[in-house]
């Protein structure tokens, strides 16, 4: 479905991604890992055609994605690719939750908009919020509304940047279950390695040098202490028990 070949990207000559190559097939569920600043969010923006490679190529369903792509191809991308940013405030701009969900449906001239809005709101557990302003909700509620608005138009590729960042444990559990039931191809970034096996079968790890450090099964990654250390995904803690002090490594479990 998507293919990157030797992609590089930089901001003001500052490298953000370097020599990145991988494929994701239709229906795959993958998790994107790496420390802050390694380029995860930028990679999602490239896949959503919000940014474009400085070097290399990106193909979506066999067609190269560039700034000069035809309007028809651009419209298809906007409909088929849904991206959820870590901060939902950057995505919410309508007066009510109802209008937020309806916006994308109206843009694609969908039928039965009212019925679909209410069905999506029920699915996402936000039906009671439809008349509320999305900007006056809690962080977790905003995240659900933003995701519902994306999901309403039926994307084939879901790009989710730290989707649990604003969610409590119950909402996080709901989202994990929800994603496991979807047929869409998904690529999800997370800092919480304990959730990684629930979010995907395949792991892509970006190193601090902005290159792809690992591409393979999540289970094998989590069993490889050397690789986790190289990716800075383990941290070391000291513990004191009376007069005895020892230290050992922990997986990062930040939410």
Image (tube, rainbow, N blue to C red):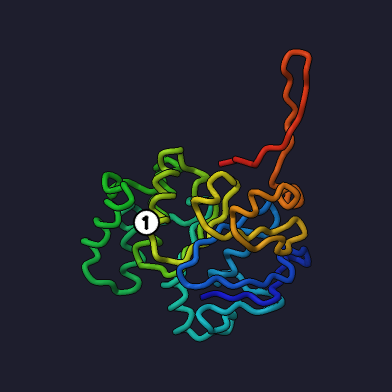
- Residue depicted at x 53% and y 69%: 48
Tell me residue 236's x, y (percent): 74, 36
Which of these two is toward me, 73 or 23?
23
| Residue shown at the point (45%, 38%) measured from the top left | 169
Characterize the local packing of mark 1: few (<14), some (14-19) or many (20 or more) Cα atoms within 10 angstroms.
many
Residue in view at x 42 percent, y 44 percent:
173
> Is residue 41 visible in the rendered structure shown here?
no
User: In the rendered image, is residue 213 in sight?
Assistant: yes
Quadrant that contains the C terminus: top right
Q: Residue tagged by mark 1?
A: 148
Q: Nearer the viewer, residue 29 or 218?
A: 218
On screen, 133 above or below 216? above
Residue at 65% across, 53% down: 221
142 and 156: which one is in front? 156
From the top left corner, tell me how far across and down residue 20 is, in percent: 69, 70
Secondary element at image label 1: helix
Q: Is residue 105 above or below residue 74?
A: above
Q: Is residue 157 left or right of residue 37?
A: left
Number of numbered callouts drawn: 1
């Amino acid at each position: 479905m998507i293919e990157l070949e030797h992609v590089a990207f930089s901001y003001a000559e500052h490298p953000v991604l370097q020599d990145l190559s991988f494929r994701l097939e239709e229906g795959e569920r993958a998790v994107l890992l790496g420390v802050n600043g390694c380029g995860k969010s930028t990679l999602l923006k490239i896949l959503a055609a919000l940014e474009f490679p400085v070097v290399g190529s990106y193909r979506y369903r066999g067609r190269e994605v560039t700034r000069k792509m035809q309007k028809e191809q651009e419209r298809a991308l906007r409909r088929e690719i849904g991206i959820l940013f870590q901060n939902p405030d950057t995505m919410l701009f309508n007066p009510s939750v109802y209008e937020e969900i309806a916006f994308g449906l109206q843009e694609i001239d969908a039928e039965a908009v009212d019925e679909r809005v209410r069905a999506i709101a029920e699915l996402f557990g936000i039906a009671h919020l439809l008349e509320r302003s999305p900007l006056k909700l809690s962080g977790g509620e905003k995240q659900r509304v933003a995701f519902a608005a994306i999901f309403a138009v039926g994307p084939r590729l879901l790009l989710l940047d730290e989707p649990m960042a604003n969610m409590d444990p119950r909402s996080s559990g709901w989202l994990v279950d929800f994603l496991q039931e979807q047929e869409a191809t998904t690529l999800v970034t997370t800092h919480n390695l304990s959730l990684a096996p629930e979010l995907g079968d395949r792991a892509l790890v970006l190193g601090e040098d902005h290159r792809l450090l690992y591409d393979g099964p999540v289970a094998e990654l989590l069993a490889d202490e050397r690789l986790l250390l190289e990716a800075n995904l383990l941290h070391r803690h000291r513990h004191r028990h009376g007069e005895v002090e020892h230290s050992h490594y922990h997986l990062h479990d930040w939410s």
